[in-house]
Amino acid sequence: MTARRRRPMLLLRRVAKTYGAGEVAVHALRGVDLVVEEGDFVAVMGASGSGKSTLMNVIGCLDVPSSGRYLLEGIDVSQLDDFELAWIRNRRIGFVFQSFNLIPRTTALRNVELPLIYARVPRHERRMLAEQALGAVGLGDRMHHGPSELSGGQQQRVAIARAIVTQPAIVLADEPTGNLDTKSGHEVMQIFSRLNAEGRTIVMITHEAEITAYAKRVVHLVDGRVDSDRRATPLAAPPPQLAAVDTEAATA
Ligand SMILES: Nc1ncnc2c1ncn2[C@@H]1O[C@H](COP(=O)(O)OP(=O)(O)OP(=O)(O)O)[C@@H](O)[C@H]1O
Ligand SMILES: [Mg+2]
């Protein structure tokens, strides 16, 4: 009997991405090898310009490699047409950005329903799923508020709810705590931790060492290549000094 090997969630082989040509060519990725299994939680670090966002765009099917091979759930995305790629982005990938990217002047609920509208999920089901996702990020009581009536941390939680509402295979986050204060950042990271504990695969870019502490694995990019890739014991709770602040606030 042959043991059946699970196919990786992501597989990149010598992925390169060059912007422009000739004298002005920028080699943003220079041969990235990366395998991410289902259930992993990867933090991607690296200096500004090292290729982190470019890598994220390739993984998220927002951009295509100039060369090399990229398989998402075993599918060679270079073979797909625009319609199929849009389907994959909508159903299989959840995106979280540094600047939240919520639609202003509409409610949190409506923001979270949006990917389900694209996915043509019927109205009543859409509503139920969006409410569940907002409940899962602790915003059950703020659903009818617009982004301008929510704190940065709450807006990012709405964005996370929007990213997970379609039950994607993978959540991609580009500096999700970059615009947040320390406490809100750790709250957002605890949500990512919980999603990962529930089996969700996460790839997250961050500049902050203390944010990488929540990941199971830290990949460093240098000049468009993987420079190091190490396993770590993830932090499930905020660091003690923040937990202490929380307790004080709760008992004040
Ligand atoms: N659309 C583009 N056209 C041309 N060059 C680009 C484009 N996007 C990125 N680059 C270049 O590719 C390189 C990698 O950029 P990338 O945005 O991936 O870096 P990053 O690691 O995300 O940086 P940061 O930490 O500042 O966000 C940089 O030199 C950048 O200027
Ligand atoms: Mg970037």
Image (cartoon, helix red, strand yellow):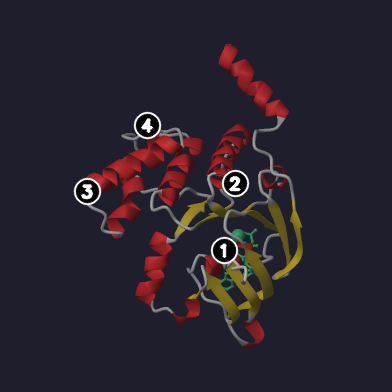
**Disc 3 versus disc 2: nearer the observer:** 3
In the displayed structure, 96 sits above or below 61; it is above
Q: Between disc 1 and disc 4, whose residue precedes?
A: 1
> Which mark, residue 123?
3
For the view shown, which residue lies furthest in the front direction?
Answer: 1
Q: In which quarter of the image is residue 224?
A: bottom right
**Dot 3: few (<14), some (14–19), or many (≥20) neighbours within 10 Å?**
few
Tell me if I can see residue 205 in this picture. Answer: yes
Label 3's element? Answer: helix
Label 1's element? Answer: helix
For the view shown, which residue lies furthest in the bottom direction?
Answer: 22
**Disc 2 versus disc 1: nearer the observer:** 1
Q: Between disc 2 and disc 1, whose residue precedes?
A: 1
Q: Do the residues labelled 2 and 1 touch (CB within 8 Å)?
A: no
Label 4's element? Answer: loop
Q: Is mark 3 within 8 Å of ligand 2?
A: no
What residue appears at the point 56 percent right and 64 percent down from the top-left corner?
9
Residue that badge 2 annotates: 178
What residue appears at the point 65 percent right and 51 percent down from the top-left corner?
206
> Which mark, residue 56?
1
Q: Between disc 3 and disc 2, whose residue precedes?
A: 3
Q: Between disc 3 and disc 4, whose residue precedes?
A: 3
Q: Could you tell me residue 208's position as x and y percent?
A: 69, 47
Q: Is residue 68 left or right of residue 170?
A: right
**Dot 2: few (<14), some (14–19), or many (≥20) neighbours within 10 Å?**
some
Q: Are marks 4 and 2 in contact (CB under 8 Å)?
A: no
Q: Between disc 4 and disc 2, whose residue precedes?
A: 4
Kind of residue sitting beneath label 3:
Arg
Tell me if I can see residue 105 in this picture. Answer: no
Q: Does the residue labelled 1 lie within 8 Å of ligand 1?
A: yes
Q: Are marks 3 and 2 in contact (CB under 8 Å)?
A: no
> Which mark, residue 142?
4
